[in-house]
Image (cartoon, rainbow, N blue to C red):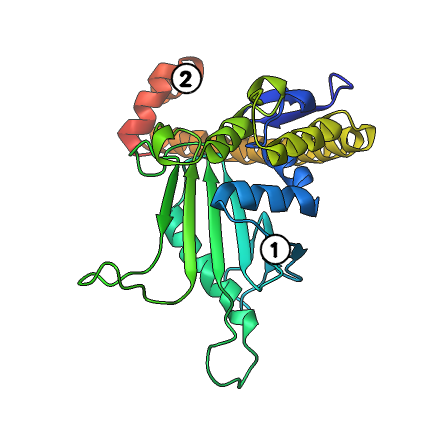
C-alpha cells in the first residue's frame, strides 16, 4: 500500500473509512453485526415495532443442492412472533433484483420444512427488504411494497405472508410516507452528522451513534486495512495473470500474421507490420486475426 491509512477501494477510488456511508458494503456489514442496529433498520424500513429480534441461525449463507447456486445475504433475523426479515443493501443498479428476491425467497423457505413434513403451515411470515441507492422503478417513490393479490379482486390477498419492500434513496414523495423513513433513507447516503436531522427519531440517533463508534474504532480500522490488503493482492494477481495471458495471445496473433504473410511472399509487409502498429492492425483485419 502507498499510504498507511484506513482506505478501501470502492468504485475505482480510495475511500477513507470516516467518509463511508451505510450504502458502502463494508460499513453496512460491520454495522449490521450489531443486532440492535438491525432492529432499527427493520423498524425504520417497515414502520413496524418489534419487541425483540434474534439472528436466524444458518441463514447468512444458504447453500443449494450440489451443483446449484446458493446465496449470501446481508443479514437475516427473526422477531419474537416468528416473522423473518431479510435485509439487503443494493448500491448499484445491476442484475434482476425482483427475480433475485424470488430466488432468495425459495431458498429461505426450504429449510423451514423438514423432509417428509406434511403441510406448509410452518412457513413463517417473510419480509424481504432491499434498500436501493437508486430508484428501481423510476417512479420517484421512497418505498415500493409488493404483496401477492388477486388480479380480478385486488383487495383479496393470496395469503402467502410474503412482503417485498424495495426502498429507494432517490424518492421524492415525502407527503406519502413517514418522516422516519425519509430521514433514514437520507441518512444512509450521508451517514454523518450532516445527514442527521436536528429533529429525528431516537432510533435513528442511536444508529448514528453506533456508526460514529465504528468509524473511530481502531480494531475496525485494522480489519479494514487487512481486508483492503487482501483485495489489493487479489487484484494484482488477477492483473498479472491478465497481462501474461494478453502477452501470450498477442505473440500468437503476431506469429500467425507473419506466417500468413510469409506464405504469400509478402516480406515487405512483414517488416512494415513489425514497425507500424496501425498497418499491423489493418493486416490483422485483412486476415481475420
Q: Quadrant of residue 66?
A: bottom right
Q: Are marks 2 and 1 in contact (CB under 8 Å)?
A: no
Q: Is residue 265 visible?
A: no
Label 2 packing within 10 angstroms: few (<14), some (14-19), many (20+): few
Q: From the viewer's perspective, is residue 105 above or below residue 255?
A: below
Label 1 packing within 10 angstroms: few (<14), some (14-19), many (20+): many
Q: Is residue 154 visible?
A: yes
Number of numbered discs visible in the structure rendering: 2
Q: Quadrant of residue 196?
A: top right
Q: Which residue is mark 1?
A: 77
Q: Which residue: 43% across, 39% down?
A: 167
Residue 78 lies, in percent from the top left, at 60, 58
Which structural element holds mark 1? strand
279 left or right of 161 in image: left
Alpha-carbon distance for marks 2 and 1?
A: 68 Å
Q: Which residue: 48% across, 77% down?
A: 121
Is residue 122 or residue 284 the one in the foreground? 122
Q: Which residue is mark 2?
A: 271
Q: State the quadrant of the C terminus.
A: top left
Q: State the quadrant of the N terminus.
A: top right
168 left or right of 212 in image: left
Residue 241 lies, in percent from the top left, at 60, 36
Q: From the viewer's perspective, is residue 37 above or below residue 199?
A: below
Q: Which residue: 48% across, 48% down?
A: 129
Which structural element holds mark 2? helix
Amino acid at each position: 500500500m502507498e499510504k498507511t491509512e484506513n482506505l478501501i477501494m470502492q468504485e475505482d477510488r480510495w475511500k477513507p473509512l470516516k467518509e463511508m456511508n451505510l450504502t458502502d458494503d463494508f460499513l453496512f456489514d460491520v454495522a449490521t453485526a450489531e443486532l440492535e442496529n438491525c432492529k432499527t433498520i427493520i423498524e425504520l424500513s417497515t414502520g413496524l415495532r418489534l419487541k425483540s429480534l434474534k439472528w436466524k441461525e444458518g441463514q447468512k449463507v444458504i447453500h443449494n443442492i450440489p451443483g446449484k447456486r446458493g446465496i449470501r445475504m446481508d443479514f437475516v433475523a427473526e422477531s419474537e412472533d416468528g416473522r423473518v426479515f431479510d435485509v439487503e443493501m443494493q448500491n448499484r443498479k445491476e442484475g434482476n433484483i425482483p427475480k433475485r428476491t424470488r430466488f432468495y425467497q425459495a431458498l429461505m423457505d426450504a429449510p423451514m420444512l423438514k423432509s417428509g413434513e406434511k403441510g406448509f403451515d410452518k412457513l413463517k411470515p417473510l419480509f424481504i427488504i432491499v434498500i436501493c441507492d437508486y430508484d428501481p422503478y423510476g417512479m420517484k417513490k421512497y418505498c415500493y411494497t409488493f404483496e401477492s393479490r388477486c388480479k380480478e379482486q385486488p383487495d383479496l390477498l393470496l395469503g402467502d405472508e410474503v412482503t417485498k419492500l424495495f426502498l429507494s434513496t432517490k424518492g421524492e414523495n415525502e407527503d406519502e410516507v413517514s418522516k422516519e423513513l425519509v430521514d433514514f433513507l437520507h441518512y444512509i447516503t450521508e451517514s454523518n452528522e450532516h445527514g442527521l436531522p436536528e429533529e429525528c427519531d431516537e432510533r435513528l440517533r442511536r444508529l448514528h451513534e453506533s456508526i460514529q463508534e465504528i468509524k473511530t474504532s481502531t480494531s475496525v480500522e485494522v480489519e479494514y486495512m487487512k481486508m483492503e490488503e487482501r483485495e489489493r493482492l487479489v487484484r494484482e494477481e488477477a492483473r498479472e495473470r491478465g497481462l501474461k495471458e494478453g502477452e501470450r495471445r498477442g505473440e500468437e496473433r503476431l506469429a500467425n500474421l507473419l506466417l500468413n504473410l510469409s506464405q504469400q511472399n509478402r516480406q515487405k509487409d512483414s517488416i512494415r507490420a513489425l514497425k507500424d502498429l496501425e498497418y499491423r492492425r489493418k493486416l490483422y483485419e485483412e486476415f481475420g486475426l
